[in-house]
Image (tube, rainbow, N blue to C red):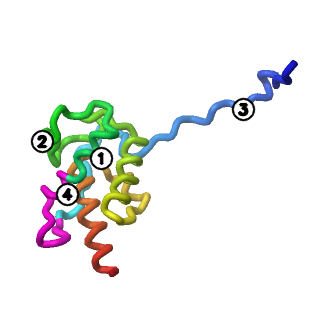
Amino acid sequence: MPHTAPASDIAPLSPPLVCPHARRGRASAPTFPARRIHPAMTTTDVLQRLAPLIQAHAGQPPADTTELASGTRLESDLRMDSMAVVHVLEDIEEQFDVTIPDEQLAVVYTVGDLVNIVLVATETTERAA
């Protein structure tokens, strides 16, 4: 007969994690300055490369990637929770060969925020090289 611990010995579940980007009621999300990382790579180029990554983790993916715009909100429009955003950021790091600081998660609200993170991170990587 297997040993089972009495209910009083079982630790309660820890409270759910609340990510800063999940807060509602903010007047506007902070944005990063839009920059071009290479004359051949534009915001549109980055958005096209991000679209499949975003679609893979969206709770309610758009029917067509052309529906993704800079103003598309990750939480309310695409039904992405904080873990989905973390997975997208991990995919971005792999796809674009960049490192994104964990603090960036707190300021990601829209597809445009993701695009700007890529532009800034890639520009920083190019400068370091």
> Which portion, as a residue range, is magenta?
35-48
Separation (CA) of disc 2 from disc 3? 47 Å
Amino acid, disc 4:
Val
- Whether the magenta-drawn stretch holds residue 34 is answered as no
Dot 2 corresponds to which residue? 66
Point out which mark residue 102 bears.
Answer: none
Q: Quadrant of residue 62?
A: top left
Q: Which numbered disc, 1 or 4, marks the residue that appears first in the sequence?
A: 4
Separation (CA) of disc 2 from disc 4? 13 Å
Dot 1 corresponds to which residue? 53
Dot 4 corresponds to which residue? 46
Badge 2 element: helix
Separation (CA) of disc 1 from disc 2? 14 Å
Badge 4 element: helix
Dot 3 corresponds to which residue? 11
Label 3 neighbourhood size at 10 Å, few (<14), some (14-19), many (20+)?
few
Q: Quadrant of residue 66?
A: top left
Amino acid, disc 3:
Ala
Q: Nearer the viewer, mark 4 or mark 3?
A: 4
Q: Tell me where residue 36 appears, x and y as whole percent.
A: 16, 68
Callouts 1 and 4 close, C-beta under 8 Å: no
Q: Which numbered disc, 4 or 3, marks the residue that appears first in the sequence?
A: 3
Callouts 1 and 2 close, C-beta under 8 Å: no
Label 2 neighbourhood size at 10 Å, few (<14), some (14-19), many (20+)?
few
- Whether the magenta-drawn stretch holds residue 43 is answered as yes
